[in-house]
Structures are given as structure tokens and as C-alpha cells.
Image: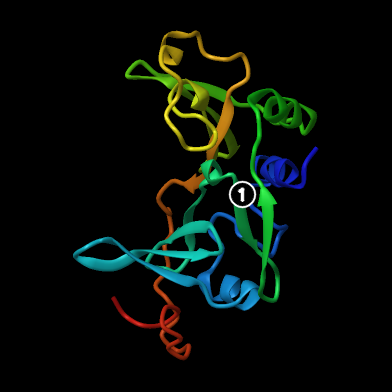
Amino acid sequence: MTDFLARLTALAATGGLDGPDGLRYNAPLPELAGHYGDPWDGGRIHRESRWPHGFSWGDVQTVFCHCRRLQSLSLPVWHGELELPLAGGGLLTLDTHVTESALIAALTAAGCRWETVTYENVPDQRTLEVAVAEEVRVAFVLTDRDGHQARDGHAAPEGHDDAPPPDDWVLNKALLWGYDHTDCPEPDRTLPDDGWGASPN
């Protein structure tokens, strides 16, 4: 099993990356900034308000609620490689090519159960969705990438779209999210304003 596949399996099993102190659903933003260093500011999700707000560490894209707790993260696996944050700062670059059969074997070995979600209007995509907890989900989006685009980014050969999809699809992206907080506390206004932890909207 590759290092990246092991991390995806841990994400499905625990709802987080990089252990109990790492990126995980409901993790406080100041705590993660202390663990990984300051994130890159990705901007507002909605134009009219500062929160929810996007941040990233390396290629890990995250969204935080106004209570400064992690609501979701996404991994753009289609890039072919990702830069993942390291504790204390710095980045680790990993090859992200994962086939469906390898992913299913890893999830099965870890005791994970999933639901396969498909959409009639997106025939070249399916999602394996894992319920990590009642309110937390991890999704692995798989695509027939070869059916529409060659791996080097060039157009697929003429007539290739008419061919049946390959037996082994590839992972396109991985997602973690949670449903709305049932008890969403206000940020602690006694904390110093670090640019996110205590400042108002």
C-alpha cells in the first residue's frame, strides 16, 4: 500500500489526516495553525460574509465555520501528486494515483463500509461514501478519466469515448465533511486577534 493510500484509508477510518492532532472534522483552526503553521488564506465562501472561510495547507483545501472549527476538507487527487502539510511546518509531496480496486482493497482491510453513489447525468463518475460517524462523511470520487482525457492532459484518441469504461477507474478527489454543528460556540473573544481566532465577522 502506498503512503498516500494509507492516509486515505486512515481518513475513511477516523475522519482525519495525520493522526489525532492533524486535519480532522471539527478541529479548531488555531490548534491546526499551531500544529502545521499558518495556513494560506483561500478567501470567503460566500461574498457577503467572512465565514465560512477557506484556508489551505499545501494542497489540502479546507473550509471553517464562524466558530473556527473545520467543516470540510478536499484533496484534489487529479493533480497526480499532492503537497501535504507536515507537523511543525513544511510539506511532503506524494504520488496520488490510486485505482478503484486498490482503494476498495484498502478500505475492506481496514473494516470500512461504504455506499456507492452514482448519478444518471454523470455516467463517468461514482462515489464511495463512508459514514465515519453519524455526522461525518468521507467521499472518494472515482472517474473514468481515460474515457475523456489522456493521462498526459491531451485529448483522448478519436473514438475512445465510444469504448466501454475500463474495469479499474481512478480516484479523482477525496472529501471530508460534517453536517451543521448542533452546538456551534462563538469564538473566544479573550484570545488575541491572530487574524482568524477571535476577530468578529
Q: Which residue is mark 1?
A: 81
Tell me: 155 left or right of 2: left
Q: Secondary structure at mark 1?
A: strand
Tell me: 183 left or right of 146: left
Q: Coloring scheme of the render? A: rainbow
Q: Position of residue 43 (x, y in %)?
A: 34, 67
Q: Is residue 139 visible?
A: no
Tell me: 31 left or right of 198: right
Q: Is residue 60 visible?
A: yes
Total marks placed: 1
Q: Position of residue 87 (x, y in %)?
A: 70, 70
Q: Position of residue 149 (x, y in %)?
A: 46, 29
Q: In what quadrant of the picture does the C terminus appear? A: bottom left
Q: Place residue 19 in its image quadrant.
A: bottom right
Q: In what quadrant of the picture does the N terminus appear? A: top right
Q: Residue at x 68, y 52 (%)?
A: 94
In this view, which residue lies farthest toward the left?
48
Q: Position of residue 39 (x, y in %)?
A: 51, 72
Q: Considering depth in this image, is 26 or 176 the residue closer to the camera? A: 176
Tell me: 127 left or right of 185: right
61 w.r.t. 170: above or below: below
Neighbor class of circle 1 (other Cα within 10 Å; few <14, some 14-19, many 20+) is some
Q: Residue at x 48, y 57 (%)?
A: 61
The amino acid on which the numbered mark 1 sits, given as a three-letter code, is Glu
198 w.r.t. 87: above or below: below
Q: Considering depth in this image, is 9 or 156 the residue closer to the camera? A: 156
92 w.r.t. 126: above or below: below
